[in-house]
Amino acid sequence: MKTKFLIILLILGLIIISCASHKTLAPISKINKDSTTNDTVKITNKDLEYEVIIIDPGFNFWLNSMAYPRGFYTQTYLENKNRIYINEWNNRFLQPQRYSRDLYEMSIDYDSNINYGYEVNYLIYNYMIYFQNNYHQKLYGRVPLR
């Protein structure tokens, strides 16, 4: 009886702590980021007329708990990694007989000649790391384990 009570108390404590630890990100100028309850991360920039939507259960939690903080990497580093990862992603998208359509549902339109800004590159890079670790894929080189 005592053990069951302690387990229930522990579970309730974890639920309360997880609800109270919600982080709020500072707004980024010219970029509207909307994170909704279904774990969707949406980034838009009306000046460049683009939109990035990341819908993957667990990504938002992973981003807030496991990813290195903004400013850890330079924008140039993120752009270079994104170019490599996205090229491989699109190659796999074009080979549905070899790679699952469940993983590579659509191609990613990423032009390395466009300056998308730090926030967009940061989120794309971190999604690529999350994707590789979560789905046991290796797009290129050593994948940081976080």
Image: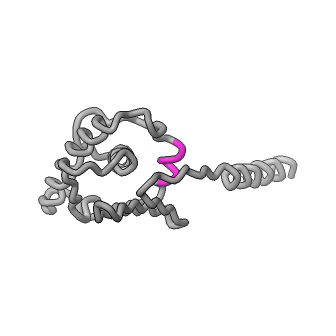
Residue 134 seen by the camera: no
Residue 3 at what x, y percent from top left? 82, 47
Q: Is 143 or 125 nearer to us in this picture?
A: 125
Horizontal relation, residue 34 to residue 76: left or right: right
Give the magenta-colored segment's residue range.
60-65
Q: Is 138 or 122 nearer to us in this picture?
A: 122
How are the colours assigned in the image?
one colour
Q: Residue furthest right?
A: 2
Residue 85 at what x, y percent from top left? 23, 45
So how many labels did they put on this image?
A: 0
- Quadrant of the image containing the C terminus: top left
Task: State the residue at coordinates (78%, 54%).
Answer: 8
Residue 98 seen by the camera: yes
Task: State the residue at coordinates (22%, 54%).
Answer: 110
Q: Is 8 or 139 nearer to us in this picture?
A: 139
Residue 13 at what x, y percent from top left? 76, 50
Task: State the residue at coordinates (53%, 47%).
Answer: 64
Quarter assignment of residue 65 = top right
Task: State the residue at coordinates (37%, 45%).
Answer: 118
- Residue 64 covered by magenta stretch: yes
Residue 42 at what x, y percent from top left? 42, 62
Q: Is residue 42 above or below residue 145?
A: below
Horizontal relation, residue 137 to residue 111: left or right: right
